[in-house]
Image (cartoon, rainbow, N blue to C red):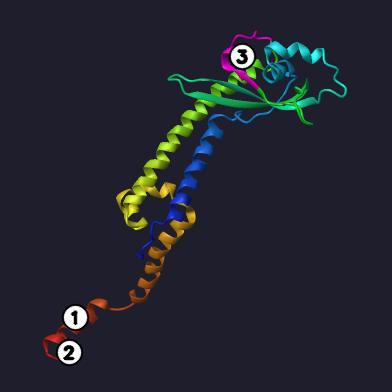
Amino acid sequence: MATVGITKELRERVSTVISRMETKEIKSDLPDFDKTYTKDASYLFHYGCWGKEHMHLVHEIPHEGWMNKVTEAYITVEGFLEGGATLSCSTRFHGLNAFARPRDGYYGKTESIIKLDQLQAMPDVVVGRAELLQRWEDAITAKEIADRWKKIKTDIDEFLTKCKTLNEAVKLFPNVRLYINSDDLERLDRKVERMTQRKKIVEDMATDELTAAAIASKLMGVI
């Protein structure tokens, strides 16, 4: 079998394969993780965009010529996980009847960010609240999946860097093939296939007889 070297490019392809595995698991376990909702979550948008203390201005400032209407936007939830780590996730809503917060320049402020504890304190009847809280729970699960695959990616890469060749890596840990790019596997397996095809050349030969004849001639001093 010819040697297939472990290059930087091969390791990058392995990283891509693992990233695809991560994406596939997230999509499988969290089918609604990227879902867009058609709901008038204008209250939540204004809360996160204007701030609770300024929301009343939406109805006091003349809309015409002063504010830009918003019919779709992302609403982001920010909060803390156990242990103190921060996390944020965004959900897109269509069908809003909202207005961007004026600011310097032509375009208004359209970012809408709500703290998790603020969202949790809102009544259940607030449109979009349930969807945002579900997205938050899904984001926690997605992070756990991503962290697990990140460790796998690190472990596999460290393993490959310790091996001299892909041949050695497969011999030491056969299941590493699951993380190898298909083109690289084809290169690796093509060597075996090629050697198998070449062996067909001697299949019809009486190799034992030929070997015995050569040995006899050598004993008789012919060669």
The mark lying in front, picked from 3 and 1, is 3
What residue do we see at 86% from left, 17% from top?
Answer: 62
Q: Is residue 50 above or below residue 171?
A: above
Percent across and percent down for residue 58 are 78, 15
* Residue on which the image places disc 3: 119
Most foreground residue, 71 or 100: 100
| Label 3 residue SS | helix
The kind of residue on which mark 3 rests is: Leu
What residue do we see at 34% from left, 74% from top?
Answer: 203
| Label 1 residue SS | helix
Percent across and percent down for residue 124 are 65, 9
Marks 2 & 3, CB-CB < 8 Å contact = no
Res 114 quadrant in image: top right
The kind of residue on which mark 2 rests is: Ile
The kind of residue on which mark 1 rests is: Ala
Disc 2 versus disc 3: distance between alpha carbons? 93 Å
Disc 2 versus disc 1: distance between alpha carbons? 13 Å
Most foreground residue, 106 or 126: 106
Disc 3 versus disc 1: distance between alpha carbons? 87 Å
Percent across and percent down for residue 16 are 50, 47
What residue do we see at 82% from left, 12% from top?
Answer: 60
| Label 2 residue SS | loop
User: Magenta residues?
Assistant: 113-125
Viewport quadrant of the C terminus: bottom left
Residue 84 visible, this angle: yes
* Residue on which the image places disc 1: 212
What residue do we see at 53% from left, 30% from top?
Answer: 29
Percent across and percent down for residue 166 are 37, 56
Q: Residues within 10 Å of mark 3 (few under 14, many from 20)?
A: many
Marks 2 & 1, CB-CB < 8 Å contact = no
- In the displayed structure, does residue 6 sit left or right of residue 122? left
* Residue on which the image places disc 2: 223
